[in-house]
Amino acid sequence: MFKKLKITCDEATTICDKNQYGEATLLEKIKLNIHFIRCKICFKYTKQNMTLTKIYKGHAKSCKELKHCLSDTDKEVLKEKLNSFKV
């Protein structure tokens, strides 16, 4: 029975990535936690992955609040430059 719960490190990282997006099943989460008991490298990978996700979500939230567009004068300058390249 326990053979079915053993997974490789590649499978563990895949489950970790799925878990970040809420796509991992309960059985996969159990397999992952059992894998962590014997593999500290995968545990560290998961921890780092979670940290990066938190950082990204914080940056993405602040980035959405900013307005990213050219001013009217910048648009006109760009149009002029593009028109000068036309054959």
Image (tube, helix red, strand yellow):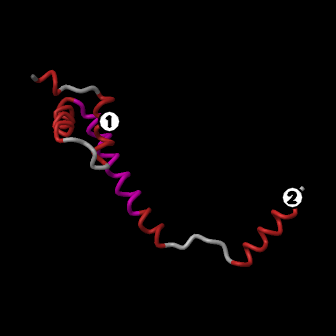
- Please name which of the two marks, 1 or 2, marks the residue nearer to the observer: 2
Q: Which residue is mark 1?
A: 13
| Extent of the magenta region | 39-58
Residue at position x 17%, y 36% in the image: 27
Q: Residue at x 73, y 73 (%)?
A: 74
Count every numbered label the image shows and give the total. Answer: 2
Report whether 61 appears left or right of 30. right
**Magenta region includes residue 30:** no
On whether residue 41 falls in the magenta region, the answer is yes
Counting from the top left corner in percent of width and height, residue 48 is at 34, 46
* Neighbours of disc 2 within 10 Å: few (<14), some (14-19), many (20+): few
What residue lies at 70% left-to-right and 78% top-to-bottom?
72
Q: Image point 31% across, 49% down: which residue? A: 21
What is the three-letter code of the residue carrying label 2?
Lys
- Indicate whether 25 appears above or below 50: above
Left-right relation of 68 to 47: right
Q: Is residue 42 above or below residue 83?
A: above
Q: Is residue 62 above or below residue 28?
A: below
**Amino acid type for the residue under numbered disc 1:** Thr
Is 78 drawn above or below residue 86 in the view shown?
below
* Quadrant in which the C terminus appears: bottom right
Could you say whether the residue bearing mark 1 is in a helix, strand or loop? helix
| Helix, strand or loop at mark 2 | loop
Mark 1 → mark 2, Cα distance in angstroms: 50 Å
Q: Which mark is residue 75?
A: none
Residue receiving disc 2: 86
Residue 70 location (% of width, % of height)? 66, 72
